[in-house]
Amino acid sequence: MSDQTTPRPAQDAPEPPARTGSGADVATKPSLVKEGPDPGPQPAPERRRLPRLFPLHQVHSLGLLVVLVLLGVVGTASSGNFLTSNNIVNILTSAAVIGVITVGQTFVIIGGGIDLSVGAIVAVASVWCTTVATQSYGLGGMLFTAVVVGAVVGLLNGVLIAYGKIVAFITTLAMMASARGVAERLSDRQSQVVTVESFNRIATDKFLGIPLLVYLMAGIVVLGWLLLNRTTFGRRTFAVGGNPEAARLAGIAVRRHTMLLYLLSGVCCGIAAVMLTARTTSGASNLGNLYELDSIAAVIIGGTLLAGGRGSLFGSILGVLVFTTITNIFVLNNLTTDIQEIAKGLIILVAVLLQRTRGARSPA
Amino acid sequence: MKETGPTAVGRRNMLLGAGALGSGLLLSACTSNSDGDADKANVKATTAASGSTPGKHVTIGFSAPAADHGWTAAITKNAKAQAGQYSDVSFQAAEGTNDVNAQISAVQTLIDKKVDVLVILPFDGKALTAIATQAMNAGIPVVNLDRVFDNSLAYRTWIGGDNYGMGVNAAAYIIKTLKAKGVSKPVIGEIAGIDNLELTKQRSLGFKEALAKAGYSVSIRQAAAFTADSGQQVMSNVLQARSKLDAVWNHDDDQGIGVEAAIKQAGRSEFFMVGGAGSKHAMQEIKADSGVLKATVVYPSSMSASAITLARLIGQSKGMGDLVEQEVPSSITLFSATVTKDNVDTYLPTSFT
C-alpha cells in the first residue's frame, strides 16, 4: 500500500472511502500504475516503515508549545500588557492571515514541493478584488474574485510543475515575480482603499469578543488538519512527498495530486488575500511582501521536513504563533526590528538543527 | 479616478502650494491638461517673460527608481506631464528601476543619446555619483532630484524634499495641539518607515529634536515598511503596547492606510495622528475629520515637475523668473508644509494617489 511510505500513525487506519472530493477519485489499486512512463525497476522501498512509539514530529510540536509558553513568560515579565485578553486576541488576529497561507504551504511542502509565490498570489488576488472594478459588485463579488484568482494562479503553478515538469522552486519563483508584476500593472501601483463597508467588517466584526478572522483561521486549520490526517488525500500527500516513485507504483496519480496541492495553496492565498485586504482596508501590489519566507519558516520550525514526506500542520501553526508572539513582545517593549530579525533567524536555525539530530537518530 | 482638467480654484490653489515651495517657477499660462490624474495639479508653466516663452529646444533625460509606491509613481508621472507642457522640450525617460546597476546603465544610455540635460532621482545617491559625474564631465548638466549624490561635482542643481523638516513640522503640530489641550506628560508614538533608509533616520531625528525642545519625547517608536500591510501589523501591536496614547506620527501616508485600519479595528480614538508625504487619501481623511488623522506633513511629489522646469531653464541658460539671479540656483530645498483641515483644500490638488 501506498501508506507504507508515510511514517505517520494514521497509516494503520484503513483507507477510507473516497470523500475528499478533490483527489479521492484517483485510482487506488496498488498495482495500477496510472500515469507517466515506466518508473523504473525498483519496487516501493519499505525502509521507512518502522514501528514508532511516539511520532517524533509530535514531540517536536510539544517542544514548540514549550517555546510558546516560555515566550508567554518572557512577555508577561517584560510587559504588563502582554497577558491581557486584548493582546492575546491581537496576537491571534495578527497570526490569522499568515496562518491560513501556512496551511497551504504545509501541504505543498509535505507533498515534496515549495511555494515561493504565496505573497505574490495574495497581492494579485487583493488587487484584483479591489481594483478591477469589483468593488462595485460588493462583498460577494470581492470574495469570489479573490478566491478564484488565488485558485487560478495556484492551479497554473500546479500545472506547470506537475505536467510541465518544471521544478517547483523555479516555477513558483517565476510566479512570485510575474504575479507581483501583474498586481502592479492592475493597480497602477496605487493603494486602492476599500469602500465596501460589509467587506471591511470581515476584519472588524467579532463574535464573543474574538474577531471573525481568528475563527476563520481556526476553521481552516481544522479543515486542513482533517484533510491531512483523516483522508485519503492527506495520506497521498505524505506518500507523494516521501517517495513519489513509490507513490506512483502504488497507484497514486502523482502528477494530478501535485497539481492539486498547489491549487490548494492558491485557494488558501485567495482566502488570506480577503482577510488581509479587509484588515488593511486596501488592495495593493505590495501586500503580502515576504509572506513566502514567513510561511516557509513557520512550516520548517513546525517540524515539517523541507524534503517532504513528513510534517505536521499543528506544528506549522505553532510556528506561526511563535513568530507572531515574538513580534508582539518586541513591540510591547519598544525594541527595534533588527534584533527581532536576528531572534527569528536563530529560532529557524535551532529548529532545523533539531530536525537534523532527530533525523540522525530516526531510521529514515 | 479620471478627472478632467484643473478647475480655476484648483489651479489657484496649486499655485499657492507652489508658492510655498519658495521657488519662483510659477505663475501661469497654465492652460489645461488633458492627461487627468494627480499630475494635472503639479503642472506649472513658468512665468511671464523669460521663463515660459519657447526658447532653444532642450532634450531632457529622466531616470528614477521603479514606480512601486504611490509617491515614486507620482514622481515619474509628474515629470512626464510637466515636460509635456513645453513645446520646446523633448522628454526621454528611462525605465524606472530599483537596481542600482540597471539605473547606471540607463543613465549611461541617456548620456550616449546626448541629451541636453539629465534629471536623476537616484535609487541610491552614493552608487550613482560616478555616472552622474561622468555626465557632468561630458558637458551634460545634471539636475539631482531628492536623494542626493555623494559629491557636489556630480550635479549642477539639487532639488528635493526636507526629511528633517518633515519631522520638525510634524513635531511642531503635535506640540501645538498638545499644549492647546493642556496635556502635561504626553505619550507620543512614532510609526517610522524603513529603518535603514537615510530619509527615515532624518525624519526621526527632526521629530525627536523638535519634540525635545518642548520637553517631550517619543514614548514608542516602531518601524514599518511603507506598505499598508506593514503599517497595520505594526500599529496593531503598538496599540497593545500603549493602552493610552496622546499623539502619533506616522511617516508615510501609504502605510497610513493600514495604520488607520488598525486603529479603527482596535476601536481606539483617544489620540490624534499626523501623517507624512501627503497622499490624496490622507488629505481626504483630514478634510472629512472623521478619524484620528488630523494633519499630514507634505513631501511634495511635485518636485519632479519642478526639476523638469529647472532642467529646461538650465538647458536654455535662463534664470528663474522672479529671482534676480541670472542662473538657476545650485540647491533648492522644498518645504514640508503641514496640511490640516484649515488648509487642506490648498494642498489636495498636489496630493498623490
Image (tube, rainbow, N blue to C red):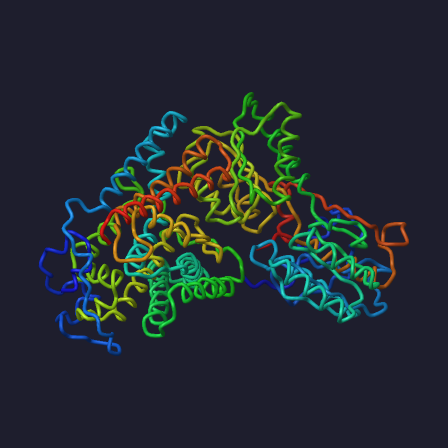
In the rendered image of this protein, does residue B55 appear above or below residue B246?
below
Which residue occupies 32% across, 57% down?
A: A307
- Quick one: which residue is furthest to the top in this view? B184
State whether residue A206 appears in this view. Answer: yes
- Quick one: which residue is furthest to the left in this view? A14
Which residue occupies 54% across, 48% down?
A: B226
Residue B139, percent from left and from top: 84, 63
User: Between residues B75 and A267, which one lies in front from this camera angle?
Assistant: A267
Residue B217, percent from left and from top: 58, 27
Q: Residue A133 lies in what quarter of the image?
A: bottom left
Q: Quadrant of the C terminus of chain B?
A: bottom right
- Count how many numbered circles sit on residues in the image: 0
State whether residue A202 appears in this view. Answer: no
Residue B16, percent from left and from top: 72, 49
Q: Quadrant of the N terminus of chain B?
A: bottom right
Residue B51 in the figure: left or right of residue A115: right
User: Between residues A214 and B177, which one lies in front from this camera angle?
Assistant: A214
Residue A292 in the figure: left or right of residue B151: left
Residue A141, percent from left and from top: 35, 62
Which residue occupies 16% across, 61% down?
A: A3
In the rendered image of this protein, does residue B92 appear above or below residue B313?
below
